[in-house]
Amino acid sequence: MRRDACLIVNPNAGGGRSARWLPRVQTALDRLGVAHRVERTRSLDHARELARSTLATGEVAAAMGGDGLLGAVAGELRGTDGVVAVLPGGRGNDFARKLGVGTNPEAACTVLAGGRERAVDLALIDGRPFVGIASAGIDSDVQAIALATRLPLGGLVYLYGTLRALARWQPARWEVTVDGERRTFTGYAVAVANSGMYGGGMRLAPAAALDDGLLDVVLTEHISRPRFLAQLPRVFRGTHVRHPRVHVLQGREVRFHADRPFTAYADGDPIADLPATVSVAAGALKVLAP
């Protein structure tokens, strides 16, 4: 099946990673016989406009950047006949990892050329779409630090942010309602997962599926700072969920807030202030998968 593509490229993603990889991606697409045009984004709104343009042309919307760009493109095409391809060009590339595309944008061209269409879920927080995980609490502080740093840390920027955030962290009191069932706890964070991965390979919700029509909700209760740090390596393996202070729930609608203000982050960007409500649009997005 012939596929033409519109490469929606954030040239600043990953500290310029997308821009550096773009010539190799174009060469790979030429070799694979994929006709394509390149559009460099000026903003997320511009990315959404470019995504809409593919509906008229019948092109695949190939998002080349980070998960933030992908979320904007996906949100624009949800519930349509539009098809999204993932060309990982950001720092984390967590949706690409979960989908099985991997983190190499040149290798991902083979999925664009010959992958199968797959219907996956999309999550929405207060109506705003995201592909990965919406989280708040210590994660809010971590993301703010990661976005502000200019150090060339690559994927390690999230570990750096965690260490800095933990030094000044104070536990919060949370209220979470999942499909009408309310619970409270004191602790670090609430995370509502669509893909289950964030932070450059952290498997926060390891059992999360992209096409089950459910959200995985991870609640992290209070433990000492040293014990919290000891759990970090386990998040990359997904084994942290065995800890008695980590709880994983599932549902289709999640409402949550804390006893002090937090901004929820998703796909690497601030997305909503708490209190917030997350819902799932089951099978609303068509993506190219291996």
Image (spheres, rainbow, N blue to C red):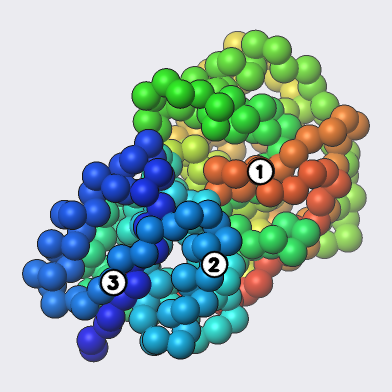
In the depicted structure, whether residue 75 falls above or below residue 13:
below
- Is 114 situated left or right of 13 in this image? left
Answer whether residue 207 is visible to the viewer in this image: no
Residue at the (17%, 68%) spot, across then down: 29
The amino acid beneath tag 1 is Pro
Secondary element at tag 3 = strand
Disc 2 secondary structure class: helix
Instruction: Give the amino acid type for the residue marked by disc 3 in the picture.
Output: Arg
Say whether disc 3 or disc 1 marks the residue closer to the N-terminus.
3
* Residue 37 - label: 3
The residue at which mark 2 appears reads as: 48
Up/down of 112 relative to 183, above or below? below
Kindly identify the residue that appears in the image at 16 percent across and 54 percent down.
24
- Front residue (pair 122, 60): 60
In this picture, residue 91 sits left or right of residue 274: left
Q: Name the disc covering residue 270, or none.
A: 1
Inter-mark Cα distance, 3 to 1: 30 Å
Classify the position of the N terminus by image quarter. bottom left
- Marked residue nearer the N-terminal end (3 or 2): 3
For the C terminus, the quadrant is bottom left
Graded by Cα atoms within 10 Å as few (under 14), some (14 to 19) or many (20 or more), the crowding at tag 3 reads: few
The answer to whether any part of residue 47 appears in the image is: yes
x, y (%) of residue 159? 48, 24
Q: What type is the residue that disc 2 sits on?
A: Arg
Residue sticking out furthest to the front: 42
